[in-house]
Amino acid sequence: MIPKADGLESASTSCRARIRPSLTIGIAGWVMYSGLAGVLQFQTGIPYPQWFKTADNAVQTAVIPLALAGLVLLAFTFWCRWDHVWRDPIRLRSTGIMKISMLAWVAMIAFRMVGITWSSVPPALLLAIIATGVGVGVAEELLFRGIFLRCLREGGRSEAAAAIWTGICFGLFHVPNIFMGMGLIGVLQVILAALSGIILYVFRRYSGLIWPAMVAHGLWDVTTFLAGGYAYPWLGRASVVAQLMFVVLGILVYISIYRNDQETAVIPEVQHHDPDPTACVS
């Protein structure tokens, strides 16, 4: 069993928090982010499959909504004063399958980069897609592998439960895309997002920091969006095989976490009454 974090550190840092991390707060943050970004995207009237057809579409449906919703998340993160949103208090062991999944993720990004016809991508659209990748990487990782994971770790909840539910909820986060023009393909996206979400968790787990997950997520989405419209024919066929590989890897990572982290608690349960919160805020 992996040792638990020092309870004294947790008690001290929770004293500085304006509100205590909880599942309710985590879900509220998810709903707030989805609602704000979703309303901004829906009011454009542009269906999801058309988001990255032009630079103007990308700016309206992705860049602006992600930037605004991301700024709200950043403001909340600094206001609430939670510990361990950006950095883990302890280093967790990563199994072999976890390391393989990260290597496969990086290899797939490189593979897509080779298969993209870069010269045919309009410069304005390329910039908009890169900006989208930055927004997605920062905002969605801060929400799920930052705020939501921190809330699920609170109170001594096992790392298995925290990680698995973070991955599943990341998949459910993509459900609105079904009703924004994707149809049944959106159902497949939800499943793939739940599987990719657990691999993005591994990037944080392996490094103990959130930013590697942000970079991995951002690069993945940039190459995905570009490959959707500007790729050599062979890339599409190869990507189908790669997606099947990631389905298997994602499932194996879920199993590995379930088997190894049932007794692991990153944020231990504090066994005493919290002090008066007003006394903790200067």
Image: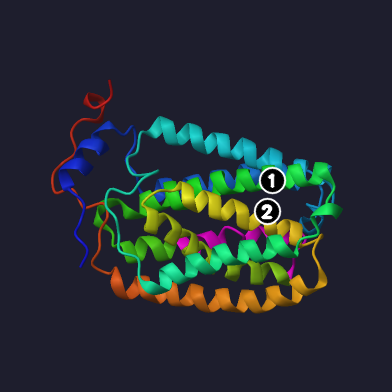
Q: Residue at x 49, y 59 (%)?
A: 200
Q: Which residue is mark 2?
A: 222
Magenta stretch: helix, strand or loop mostly: helix
Q: In the visual, does 57 lie left or right of 136?
A: right
Considering the numbered disc 1 on the image, is that residue within a helix, a strand or a loop? helix
Residue 142 in picture, x, y percent from top left = 49, 45
Q: In the visual, does 10 lie left or right of 37?
A: left
Residue 152 lies, with reference to residue 259, above or below; the image says above
Q: Which mark is residue 130?
A: 1
Residue 78 in picture, x, y percent from top left = 42, 32
Dividing the picture into quadrants, the one containing residue 67 is top right
Residue 185 in picture, x, y percent from top left = 72, 70
Q: Quadrant of the N terminus?
A: bottom left
Residue type at mark 1? Ile
Considering the numbered disc 2 on the image, is that residue within a helix, a strand or a loop? helix
Please say if the residues under marks 2 and 1 sit with CB atoms less than 8 Å apart. yes
Q: Quadrant of the C terminus?
A: top left
